[in-house]
Image: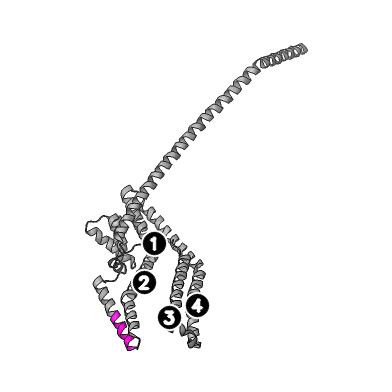
Amino acid sequence: MFGLDITVVAIIALVAIAAAAVCYGLLFSRMEVEKKADTRLSRVKAAETDFAKANAARDRVQELSKRRKSVQDSLKDLEKKQEEKNRKLGDGSLKSRLAQTGLPLTVGRFYVFSALFGVFVFLVTLIAGLPMLAAIGAAFVSTVGLPRWVIGYLVKRRQRKFLDEFPNALDVMVRSIKSGLPLNDALRLIASDGQEPVKAEFRRVVESQQVSLSIPEACTRMMLTMPLPEVNFFSIVITIQSQAGGNLSEALGNLSRVLRDRKKMKAKVSALSMEAKASAVIIGALPFIVALLVYLTSPDYIAILFTDPRGHLILLFSGVWMSIGIFVMRNMINFDI
């Protein structure tokens, strides 16, 4: 009985397995078709999703490019307007040059001092026994050339001091704005506690606001007494922030970093070009040194250059060619950053 039950159970199991195998054989192709259809559908959905994402990304890129182009166009227009204002402000006249020195000099006082210095040099050269023509030439140079050279030297020295201190002033402004102070108070802080000549320039900005000028206009007028690209950058940043808004502290911080990088680049270029400058100085001074040594050792040998008309012609052509060579070397070793 027990053996019969086992046989029946085995037969039933074998029948069930056979039935399952037959069903699987019949339904396998359908199951494969449904599986492939599901796979294909998932791929199509994924492709549609990727296509939608690609379209959205492309739209975002196009929008960003359009916005970037719009900002670039507005910056170019603003820069052109700023350059036109700067050309109108910085006319390069003697009055503006005197204002850039930071000294309380007027045009009348400058002319008076130049004339007095020329008369003094003329009298000194006459007392020293020089010929009248040489005394007149020295007086002319002392009246017209030397005072203007001194003014140019004072302007460049003041601009160098300004560039050394200007990034520090911008950092102080950034910290002041981040701490909650408005831009007016940040400008007054630099005008009261800054270092010269930045202090004087920002004091003029504050004084310009007191006569009903806006902050961008007051910053633009700084180009009158400090015509530098760095000041132009600063006025452009202030103007853009006043028109379009934005994070002023971040913009000023970026400007301060850019100015420091420009200073480092200038120092690096100056160091790399120092050898060329030394060579240019030696080459330019060599003819004069040789002429002086020849005059000291054999004055009769070189005196013909100063006594004979042909020597005068040689000196004239030599001076012209020397001037051309010095001008070319100067352009070769000077770099604008």
Q: In which quarter of the image is residue 11?
A: top right
Secondary structure character of the magenta stretch overall: helix
User: Which of label 3 and label 1 is nearer to you?
Assistant: 3
- Cα separation, mark 1 vs mark 2, equals 23 Å
Which SS class for mark 1? helix
**Residue 193 visible from this viewpoint:** no
The residue furthest left is 211
The residue furthest front is 309
Between 182 and 239, the residue placed more toward the observer is 239
User: Amino acid under label 4?
Assistant: Leu
**Residue highlighted by disc 1:** 167
Q: In which quarter of the image is residue 21?
A: top right
Please tell me whether residue 299 is drawn above or below residue 270 in the rendered image: below
Q: Which portion, as a residue range, is magenta?
A: 118-128
**Residue highlighted by disc 3:** 309
**Residue highlighted by disc 2:** 153
Q: Does the magenta stretch include residue 117?
A: no
User: Amino acid under label 3?
Assistant: Pro
Which SS class for mark 4? helix
User: Amino acid under label 1?
Assistant: Pro
Q: In which quarter of the image is the N terminus?
A: top right
- Tell me the residue at 31%/74% (across/down): 144
**Residue highlighted by disc 4:** 286
- Cα separation, mark 3 vs mark 2, equals 38 Å
Please tell me whether residue 242 is drawn above or below residue 55 in the rendered image: below
User: Few, some or many C-alpha atoms within 10 Å of disc 4 (few <14, some 14-19, many ≥20)?
Assistant: few
Q: Which of marks 3 and 4 is nearer the N terminus?
A: 4
Q: Which of marks 3 and 1 is nearer the N terminus?
A: 1
User: Amino acid under label 2?
Assistant: Tyr
User: Few, some or many C-alpha atoms within 10 Å of disc 2 (few <14, some 14-19, many ≥20)?
Assistant: few
Q: Earlier in the sequence, mark 1 or mark 2?
A: 2
